Amino acid sequence: MITLTDSAAAKVQELIQAEGEPSLALRVAVKPGGCSGFQYEMYFDGDVASDDNLATYGDVKVLVDPASAQLLAGATLDYKNGLQDAGFHITNPNASRSCGCGQSFS
């Protein structure tokens, strides 16, 4: 299961509040694609499947499907707000290599 840093959880909470749907959860998934084989996908989801992995960070709920959970075990989602590397970033110890743009991995 992926772990959220405090800054990532705060930013996700801010974005959920902007959506006006406090029941939404952040879904993090791994899908085939990208130039290295797999790519990350993150979006807000109101549907929880019976086999989803659920973690809570303060008021933020995070959902991960079972197949993605295997590829995200030990991963961390961080958020940085600065001139360099601003935005969300996933550090994944299961990724043996990533593409130059940082959007996909294998």
Image (spheres, helix red, strand yellow):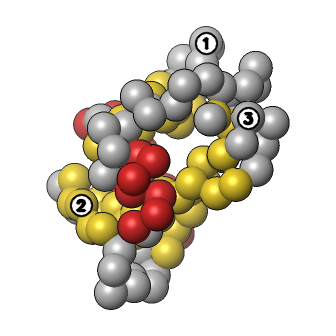
Q: Secondary structure at mark 2?
A: strand
Looking at the image, is mark 1 or mark 2 earlier in the sequence? 2
Q: CA distance from mark 3 to mark 2?
A: 28 Å
Residue 68 pos. (x, y %): 47, 58
Residue 9 pos. (x, y %): 33, 46
State whether residue 96 appears in this view: yes
Residue drawn at x 41%, y 46% as measured from the top left: 72
Give above or below for 86 relative to 77: above
- In the figure, is residue 50 to the left or right of 67? left
State whether residue 26 appears in this view: no
Q: CA distance from mark 1 to mark 2?
A: 29 Å
Residue drawn at x 39%, y 56% as measured from the top left: 69
Residue located beneath label 1 in the image: 84
Residue drawn at x 34%, y 80% as measured from the top left: 51
Q: CA distance from mark 1 to mark 3?
A: 24 Å
Residue located beneath label 2 in the image: 55
Residue located beneath label 3 in the image: 36
Residue drawn at x 73%, y 25% as measured from the top left: 99
Residue 18 pos. (x, y %): 50, 63
Image marks 1 and 2: residues in contact by CB distance under 8 Å: no
The residue nearer to you, when weighing 55 against 53, is 53
Residue 10 pos. (x, y %): 33, 44
